[in-house]
Amino acid sequence: MRILAIDHGTTRMGIAISDEMQMIAQPLEFIPADPFDRFMVRLKEILAEKEVGLILVGMPRNMNGSYGPAAEKVREFVAVLKESLVTPIQTWDERLTSAQANRFLIGADVKREKRKEKVDKTAAAILLQSYLDRGV
């Protein structure tokens, strides 16, 4: 089974997918967050195409481990997903994934205009890879 990761955002949702052996995460795409019904249609297409067995949603946390307003938005998002999907959903700490994604893309010499469209799916891949590497 594959695992799909979502880097939740108010403008774009970054999507990454694991290989079938759950060893390697790769960025897939970003889906505009609005309109939400279109987001859900595309998400359901990906879930079916890729035979996803688990959805991993990044949970933003403050550096001290506490949860802020962004975490509440993610909790609401996860609640809506759970009402609409049968695929199991889990959250995972996403601290600094966007910063890591930006550093990675800058290091790869990706121009600023292109970074904007790649950062969300790259952050989702970093989130997913950290989950895959957890050693369980």
Image (tube, helix red, strand yellow):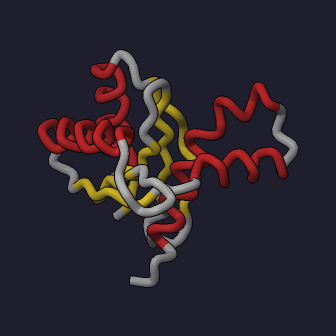
Q: Residue furthest left?
A: 83
Q: Nearer the viewer, residue 43 or 110?
A: 110
Q: Measured along the vertical axis of the image, is residue 58 above or below residue 120? A: below
Residue 119 image-quadrant placement: top right
- Counting from the top left corner in percent of width and height, residue 57 is at 36, 50
- Residue at the (28%, 20%) spot, across then down: 37
Q: Is residue 107 left or right of residue 135?
A: right
- Figure quadrant of the C terminus: bottom left
Q: How many numbered circles are shown?
A: 0
Q: Residue furthest top?
A: 35
Q: Is residue 123 left or right of residue 10?
A: right
- Residue at the (41%, 25%) spot, across then down: 33
Residue 49 image-quadrant placement: top left
Q: Measured along the vertical axis of the image, is residue 61 above or below residue 31? A: below
Q: Measured along the vertical axis of the image, is residue 122 above or below residue 113? A: below
Q: Nearer the viewer, residue 53 or 30?
A: 30
Q: Measured along the vertical axis of the image, is residue 46 above or below residue 11? A: below
- Counting from the top left corner in percent of width and height, residue 115 is at 72, 35
- Figure quadrant of the N terminus: bottom left
- Counting from the top left corner in percent of width and height, residue 94 is at 47, 55
- Counting from the top left corner in percent of width and height, residue 83 is at 12, 39
Q: Residue furthest right?
A: 109
Q: Nearer the viewer, residue 25 or 101?
A: 101
- Residue at the (46%, 54%) spot, across then down: 62
Q: Is residue 96 left or right of residue 109?
A: left
Q: Is residue 74 left or right of residue 28?
A: left
